Amino acid sequence: MKETLGRYKNVHFLKITPADVPQFLSSIDCYALVSGLDAFPSTVREAQLARAPVVASNVGGIHEATATSSWNRIVENKDTEQWVETLNEFINGKGQNEEGRTYVISKFRWEVSIQEFEKICSREIRRKSTQ
């Protein structure tokens, strides 16, 4: 792949480790997830934690993983004009996605996930015991 894509000026292969990802995400103009099928991508949450503006496809659980904020946008896959407009706005905007970070911390911390899971289990146990 490097031989094929490496000849283009706008394609860069990065040598980063998983430990480098938060710093990398905090340095980018925006994170774009163009996808035709994505259940609940962790990359969208990781980008928001790093305060990166997010532009993502309106598929699967992306909407639930993305905070409603001025620095996050959900775009229809086939709307090329909206993609270009939004990416240009974010690239030229240089904003930080504080709302996205706050959303991810409040909704997806381990403690919150465990509490929600326990609620679901308790509800199902009560439901089964009344049948």
Image (cartoon, rainbow, N blue to C red):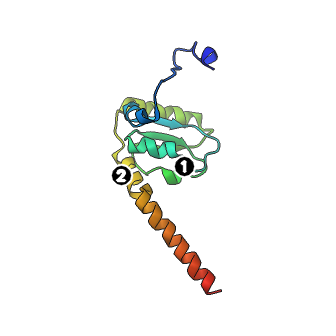
Structural distance between the alpha carbons of marks 1 and 2: 17 Å
Q: Residues within 10 Å of mark 1 (few under 14, many from 20)?
A: many
Quadrant (top left/top right/bottom left/bottom right) for the N terminus:
top right
Q: Which residue is mark 2?
A: 102
Residue pointed to by mark 1 = 62
Q: Residues within 10 Å of mark 2 (few under 14, many from 20)?
A: some
Q: Residue at x 52, y 22 (%)?
A: 13
The residue sitting at 38% across, 40% down in the picture is 50
Residue type, label 2: Thr
Q: Position of residue 26 (x, y in %)?
A: 37, 35
User: Residue furthest toward the top?
Assistant: 7
Left or right: where 79 falls relative to 118? right
Residue 99 x %, y %: 36, 49
Q: First in sequence: mark 1 or mark 2?
A: 1
Q: Nearer the viewer, residue 108 or 70?
A: 108
- Quarter of the rendering containing residue 75: top right
In the rendered image, which quarter is residue 97 located in? top left
**Above or below, comparing residue 71 to residue 63 in the picture:** above
**Mark 1: secondary structure:** helix
**Would you place residue 16 above or below residue 118 in this image?**
above
